[in-house]
Amino acid sequence: MKIGIVCYPTFGGSGVLATELGIALSDKGYEVHFITYEQPVRLTQGFHPNIYFHEVKVPTYPLFDFPPYETALASAMVNVIVNQDLDLLHLHYAIPHASAAYFARQILKKSGRDIPFITTLHGTDITLVGRDGTYAPVVTFSINESDAITAVSDSLREETLRSFSIEKEIHVIPNFVDVKRFHQTDKNHFKQMLAPDGERILVHVSNFRPVKRVPDVIRIFAEVKKEVPAKLLMIGDGPDRQMVEEMARNLGIYNDVRFLGKQEQISEILSIADLFLLPSETESFGLSALEAMACSVPVISTNAGGLSEINVHGKTGYLADVGDVAAMAGYAISILQNDEELLHFKKAAIAHARKFEKQHIIPKYELLYEKVIADYKLTRESKRLC
Ligand code: GMT
């Protein structure tokens, strides 16, 4: 089977998941074609003979204040589908991928070369951006035109049904983790460098956007530090980084916080972590938390969106209401102050993460692909006969 995957190629969870899915499918013998404007971040590690990358180029012209990416993407889809003889397109993140796919399919219908497309909803395409009236009509239409729709958590499925008039079933296929790559390895030399006096290490990974409530990470850490010797590693970059660096300076904890920026070898850093902080305003799934758990790191998070579907309160970590810094700090302190309890949580985190191992999840996508392709052929055939 030849599958086209369309995603954002950045560090964001949807692009990461799409890339990991493409790699997993290619390992199983599928031919995978990524169609996007840059080489996806996780694709830069190692060579995968069954994976092809097709760059979407958006020519600029002085007339364009806003170069038409969606048009360039739809044209790229048409070219790749025809030239590579694809069987299916799988779109990650509705905007603008689903509407571009609809456009591409209409073009291809003229020559009978059209193929089905599946849209996977990841979160902000529904919860923040998609719901905005600026995009909502196009998002609703193109989701409904998809041959199948998937959401990464029950919570996101429900939110989508609440926010849009969806006429089709939404299949929940949770995100997954490759525990062969995400697991704890011996990185004690890093630990010695970053926490020379045996301090506990807390980690936060995100794109530092307001939805992540990064200031709460700093506030939680400031409270933890009053009770437990600790260091905080901040991974990622984004609009709120400067503000929280300033905040750490003002709170007098800057020397205990390391802002590491965007990192590709996240599992190496997670290997030395004792606790992962994710106090997001909303989070459809929280792939970064799952990757932390796979590296045996317990999670302190909010109970927003789908977080409670992966972080089990009192077992793999703790959950608290959005903005309840005192509760999250209290939970962090209780875990970090007790070696035995910390070990207990670490073991539960990895055990729970294994339920989301890729070999349990990938077959769900494979089954869906087969069904969608078969149904599409059947519908086309019956239309031809009419
Ligand atoms: O979290 C972000 O801002 C990035 C965003 C994305 O689309 O790349 O992440 C979303 O998709 C991830 C993968 O499915 C989920 O794990 C994240 O929870 C989700 N983010 C939000 O819902 C805020």
Image (spheres, grey):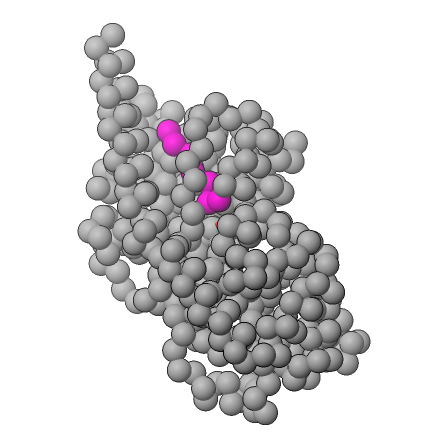
Residue 119 figure quarter: top left
Residue appearing at x 34%, y 38% in the figure: 89
Residue 230: give x, y in percent of width and height: 63, 81
The part of the chain drawn in magenta is 147-153
| In magenta stretch: residue 299 | no
Residue 156: give x, y in percent of width and height: 53, 41
Closer to the camera, 82 or 343?
A: 343
Note whether 66 is above or below 197 in the view shown.
above
Closer to the camera, 207 or 281?
A: 281
Residue 244: give x, y in percent of width and height: 71, 68
Residue 72 visible in the shown view: no
Residue 295 visible in the shown view: yes
Name the side, left or right, on which 192 lies relative to 181: right
**Location of the C terminus (image quadrant):** top left
Note whether 348 is above or below 38 in the view shown.
below
Residue appearing at x 45%, y 89% in the figure: 189
